[in-house]
Image: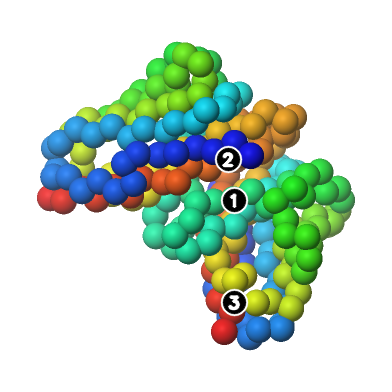
Amino acid sequence: NAGVMQNPRHLVRRRGQEARLRCSPMKGHSHVYWYRQLPEEGLKFMVYLQKENIIDESGMPKERFSAEFPKEGPSILRIQQVVRGDSAAYFCASSPWPGSYEQYFGPGTRLTVT
Amino acid sequence: TQLLEQSPQFLSIQEGENLTVYCNSSSVFSSLQWYRQEPGEGPVLLVTVVTGGEVKKLKRLTFQFGDARKDSSLHITAAQPGDTGLYLCAGDEGVGFQKLVFGTGTRLLVSP
């Protein structure tokens, strides 16, 4: 009964390095959402992807952030040249179809930029 | 951007007490969900309400969606220490896929 898996759970990067966060959706789910939770703030939508397609990236910062969900393998959230303000918990969620009322969240990746 | 405000932000009560958490917006949502999040973990879906005026019960938890689909409430009867956690409401903007707007959260502490 594998749920949404994210790795790594904790990631420490120095300013200027790249961070790669991985998300494997639940079995049978082909829709992935990424959210960011800044310290003392709520969860904010970043991007919605289907296999090989970015459907909505309206919540993604314009620079340094990118996401992909290849035909094979996990979804990747990539942050280039990280800055201290990128320190946050990043969650992915998956659903079986776009209109599903249920999103299942992974445990998150906690990124710390030093 | 639609906003969801939750109240209260913090709630500390004794075991056995009842409580209500509110989730309010000036915007209409196509559906609304309630999640509970434990420290260091991702949110866990508790319930989804879809129809205005809908009431759903999950053991000691009662969820209501406002008639106008702009607000919701979560009522817990006879709270237990295991209910401690961060409660989040999330509204679906209804843009063709489930684009969730999360509330500010209510942190509940239930003491024995």
In the image, is B25 to the left or to the right of A25?
Answer: left
Residue occupied by mark 2: B101
Disc 2 from disc 3: Cα separation: 25 Å
What crowding class fits label 3: few (fewer than 14 Cα within 10 Å), some (14-19), or many (20 or more)?
some
Q: Position of residue B62 (x, y in %)?
A: 33, 25
Q: Position of residue B42 (x, y in %)?
A: 50, 54
Q: Amino acid at mark 1?
A: Lys
Disc 2 from disc 1: Cα separation: 7 Å
Element at label 2: strand
- Mark with earlier residue (1, 3): 1
What crowding class fits label 1: few (fewer than 14 Cα within 10 Å), some (14-19), or many (20 or more)?
some
Element at label 3: helix
Q: Is residue A93 above or below residue A75?
A: above
Q: Amino acid at mark 3?
A: Arg
Residue occupied by mark 1: A44
- The residue under the point 72% across, 56% down is A60
Residue A69 visible in rendering:
yes
Residue occupied by mark 3: A84
Which chain does the residue under circle 3 lie in? A
Disc 1 from disc 3: Cα separation: 18 Å
Element at label 1: strand
- The residue under the point 48% across, 64% down is A39
Q: Which mark is residue B70?
A: none
Instruction: Look at the numbered discs 2 and 3 and tell me whether their residues touch, using CB distance below 8 Å.
Output: no
Q: Position of residue A36 (x, y in %)?
A: 59, 57
Q: Pick the quarter of the image with the C terminus of chain A.
A: bottom right
In the image, is A110 to the left or to the right of A30?
Answer: left
- The residue under the point 63% across, 82% down is A13
